[in-house]
Structure formats: C-alpha cells, structure tokens
Image (cartoon, rainbow, N blue to C red):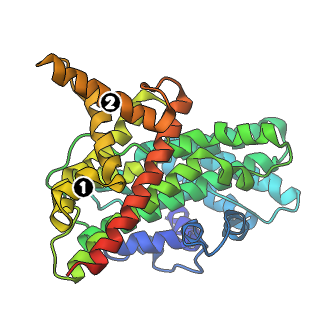
Amino acid sequence: MENKESIIEAASSISSMVAKINEVCGGSSALWASAAKPQLTALDVALGQRSISEIIAAQSKWSVETISPVTAAISALAQNITEPQLSVLAALENKTSLLAHDNGIAKITSVATQISSISDILASQTDYIKELIAPKAMLSDLQTIAMQAHKAIEATGQLSAWQLGMVDTASIMVDRQVNWASKICSAEFNVTPLPRIEDVIEIKPRVNVIALLPDELKREKEKKEDITPEEALVKSPAYRMSEKGKRIIDKVVAINRICERKGCEKLFKYTGATMRAAASIGGTVCQTEETFGGIIDDFYEVFYENIEHIKAIVTDEVVRNEDVYQCIFRVKHMRTDMRHDYEHGKEKDIRNKDLAIGDSYKHYVGKPVLITSSDYLITQEKLYDEFDVLADHLLALVETFA
C-alpha cells in the first residue's frame, strides 16, 4: 500500500495531457485527484504559441529526489502484476536519476510513469478507443526508445545529453498524439465516457512516427554534429508529416462543427473506420508500399466515401473538373492499383484505368510507379499538402453555405 501511495502522490505532477484525457474519458480518476501544476504540451507547437525547443525546455520532468522512490515503487508494483518490461524500465530510470543527481541535473523524464499514467487513465475504455487514443504499438515504441537510452547510459556510467534528449522528444511526440487523438474523439462524441463505436473494424490505427524517430534524428545528427534532439525533431519527416496530417483532420472536424452549428448535415460522416483513418493520417510516415497503401485507404475513407456530400454543396461537375478536388480522384486511382484486380473486362477500360493510375503517380513523383522509400514519402507529403488546400477550400464553402 505504501508503494501505491507513493506512485499516486508522485504521479500528481504528470502533464496537462492527463487532465484533458481524463475529461474526455469521463469522470475523475483517483490517480489524478491531487493534480498539481500542468506541464506544457506539444499541442502548443501546433497552435503556434511556442517552439518545440521551448516546449522541451519547459517540460515538467521528475526531480531526481522524487523519481528514485517513484520508479522503485513502479518497478516493484509492475513486476508483481502485469508489466515486467515497464518494471525493468523503471529500474533503469532509477539508476539514471541517481547518476543525474551526482552530476547536478535536477530533473529527468520518466517514460515508465508516463506509460503507466496513460494506461491508467484509459483503463475504463474499450480496446478500440484505447487504440485510437494511445495505440499499444506506439507506447511500446516509446518504451523501447527509453530502454535503449537508459541501457546505454548504464553501460557507460555517463549521462548522454543526446540520449536523454531523444527520450524527451519521443515522450513529447507521444504526449502530442494522445492529446490530439483524445480531442478528435471528444469532438465527435461530445459525451463522456466515450461510447462504444458499433462499426468497429479489426484494423488498428497505424502510428509509426515514434518508431522512426531514432533513425531520423540520427540522420540529422550526421549532417550537423552539434544539433540537439529537439532541433533535429523539427527537421524530421516524422514530426513534419504527423503535424501536417493532424492539421488536415483538425480542419475536417472544424468543417463538421460548422455544419452542425448551421443546422446542416455533417459533410464528413464519422464511423469507426474514419476515426481509425484520422488517427493514422496524424501519426504515419510512409516509407513502404504497405504504409503508403494504408494512408491511401485512409484518405479514401475520409474524403472519397464522402464525395457525394461534397457534391451536394457544389455540383458533380465542379467536383469532377476543378483542380482542388482532383486529389480525391487520384487517391481513388492509386487505391484501385493497390487494392483491386482491375485487369478484367474490356481492354479499353483496363487501359484507361492503367493510364489514370500512372498519371496519378506521375503527378507526384514524375514517374508512373512508386519504387523507392523516397517516392512514397514525397507522394505522401504532396498529398497532404493538396488535401490541406482542399480542407481550406471546404471550410470556406461551409462558412458561406446557408
């Protein structure tokens, strides 16, 4: 009991993300009842209020006087219950905190506490909602990064500013994804706790930005030796693509909200599939055919599946002919290539489909097929830019729509 009370007391200074998720999920968990000062979150970055460097510098970390008993308590508790790997991480963090204390460093980030906190706050939710807000794979990726960093520190017996900074940036990226995804769920349901989504599909959101961070930051360090992890982060595709994707989905949510407040039907229908697609668009970097195919499915689900609603506020002719809408049809063509066997039927029809597919790829990378990881990433980024423009266009339309 004493260990559990120590965890509850120490966890009271976890980030403001917890309070927001708690609000979304309904009720007030006892774990957060005594919440103290909130930390800044990476949400501020998207809002343009602070730079990522300022966010990381201001992040509320655990004091070394506190983290030792906290991580020791988590280690003992987790080992006896369900999370042996989290116990190992907590023990490693404990050793790093002692080393930090000896070197005059006042605070370090505790990923073991962060993961425990997120898991606790979402404990009452369905597995599907948990995966939308905080995918297990993403939390596992964060834990892996933290484990590797603390093992490296333990092996050398020396603190590494780069390793600790890597943990900080990964922790903030997870904070950002969880905070943002919880807002998307809240915007749709407007009730707490979140209800069960009836048309749940088995496919989980694809959130790979955390797993890619170490390699992406390492590449930036190879270009500039004295770069900091937070400086490298803002140059990384993981950060860039996740923020672009989140911006598109935020605009989709805003469009629907405007429609509702004007007494009109939502332009985008929310389903379990579109919620999963939204989470993936805001958390995936494409480097392979598999990840790119997933993003194509997601844009198809959100935009093409709602194209009739869009036509209703303009016209079929406008949607088919104006440039701003053509990204929707290019997604349709690329999805035909990746998901359908279209080489049946009339030869002319097959040829026309093949040409449309090739033209769609050429629009983005100048060649009729995607081959390299760079091809997938470039196409993804250009797609995101086009759909961002489309979202702005639709926002302007619904704002003037009677």
In the depicted view, which residue is nearer to us: 138 or 344?
A: 344
Q: Farthest residue in the left direction? A: 345
In-front residue for pair 124/84: 124
- Residue on which disc 2 sits: 357
Looking at the image, residue 106 lies above or below residue 297 = below
- Can residue 76 be seen in the rendering of this structure? yes
Residue 297, percent from left and from top: 30, 41
Which residue occupies 52% across, 45% down?
A: 209
- Screen quadrant of the C terminus: bottom left
Circle 1: residue type:
Val
Residue for badge 1: 319
For residue 81, side relative to residue 225 (left or right): left
Determine the secondary structure under disc 1. helix
* Picture quadrant of residue 92: top right
Task: Name above or below for residue 174 compared with residue 288.
Answer: below
Residue 85 in percent (x, y) is at 53, 40
